Structure formats: C-alpha cells, structure tokens
Image (cartoon, grey):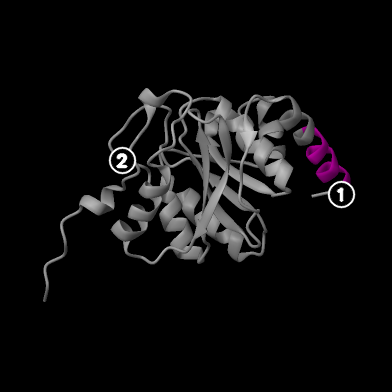
Amino acid sequence: MAYGDLMLRRLVSRLYWACSRWTLSTEPAPARPTVLLGVPHTSNWDFALMLAIAWRLGIHVRWLGKASLFDGWRGPLMRKLGGIPVDRSDPSRVVSDVVARIRGGEKFGLVVTPEGTRGAGAYWKSGFYRIARETGLPVTLGYVDRTTMTTGLGPTIELTGDVRADMDVIRAFYADKSGMRPEYRTEPRLREEDAPAAPSA
C-alpha cells in the first residue's frame, strides 16, 4: 500500500474514533499475518467498524464478500477496500485462493465473519479454521460489544488442530460479547465439533 494511502486512512480513522460513540479498546495489532475474526456479525455497521479498527492500527486487511457485492461500479471500490469476491457455489475455491495468496508472499490480515449471513444459525462457517490451519496463521479475535459500546481486537491464538478445544477458547472470549442485533447471534460452534468420531482401528 502506498504511503499516502496509509496516512490518509489513519487520518480518517482518527477522525472517526474522535467522533464515534464507540470506544476502541484493543490489544496491539498482530506482528505477523493473521486470520482476523469479525464477531458478532449482526449488522452492516460491523463493516465500517472493521475498517476503522484496521485503519487505526495500520493493518492491511483483506476480507471475503459475496460476489454480488463486486458487481458494476462497486467492484473497483470493494477491491480497493481489500475485498475478495466469494463464489458461494464453490466455497472451497476461496480457501485455495487465500492460501495461494499467503504462500505467494502477500502480507495481510484476512477478515472473516464466520457467522456467515446476518441471521441466527446453528453453526459458524469453518473456512476461517481451514485457512488458518493450512497456512499456519494465528487467529485474532476481533469483536463488537454493544453492551459496553467497545470494539477492537482481542487476543491472538494459535490453533492446535483439536477443533473442540480451540473453539472452547473462542467461545469463552465471545461469551459476554453482544452484537448490534443480539437476536441474530450464532453460537461459536463448528459442524466438525458434532461430527461422530472415526472408529478406532
């Protein structure tokens, strides 16, 4: 990213936080590329908060968005803001694309909203977990909490491959966080946690 763009983004973010009713309460930005969770994801305003956090902390972010967001005049803007279009008919392809970008040396924090759609569901989408494991990237727990009107970055964790144990850590962090529309919250749980164990040999 050009130096001028970086300085402009930091200036815009400083003005935003000076005027916002939200308080930025955050741990320092990760020192290396990371998978950055945006949770809870219950409103379009989450996107603005995510950009404000990243720009204030100087994090170059990429984020995954449905392909229709990139149609027409919006395409160049969304890509300029770090967007990567997702073809929902082939979700495995985007995992491969992101892995290839990271292994190719591109440096960024990948913002993922694992709740998927802004509506309550039974499970989170597991793409963030697969990307982190395949690339060896840590996972940073970004958050919004309407009850305290705070937002920012929580801890950065290394995944172990024990899905349930890793998700227990993530569940504990988000247990007291409330999104802008709490009724749309999805409990942090992956389908893989409830899969039957493979029979022993």
Q: Secondary structure at mark 2?
A: loop
Report if residue 188 lies within the magenta region.
no
**Predominant SS along the magenta part:** helix
Earlier in the chain: of badge 1 and badge 2, it is 1
Q: Are marks 1 and 2 in contact (CB under 8 Å)?
A: no
| Residue under numbered circle 1 | 3
> Which residue is painted at 44% across and 23% down in the image?
181
Secondary structure beneath disc 1? helix
Q: Residues within 10 Å of mark 2 (few under 14, many from 20)?
A: some
Q: Nearer the viewer, residue 165 or 84?
A: 165
Does the magenta run of residues contain 9?
Answer: yes
- Could you say which disc has been placed on residue 199 in the image? none
Return the x and y of residue 34 as percentages of the image width and height: 57, 57
Side of 6 relative to 124 (left or right): right
Q: Label 1 is placed on what type of residue?
A: Tyr
In the displayed structure, would residue 147 be above or below residue 62? above
* x and y, in percent, of residue 136 in the image: 50, 66
Q: Which residue is mark 2?
A: 123
Depth order, front residue of 161/28: 28
Give neighbour class at mark 1: few <14, some 14-19, many 20+ (Cα, 10 Å). Answer: few
Q: Position of residue 1 (x, y in %)?
A: 79, 50
Q: Which residues are magenta?
A: 4-12
Question: In the picture shown, does residue 82 fall above or below 184?
Answer: below
- Disc 2 residue type? Tyr
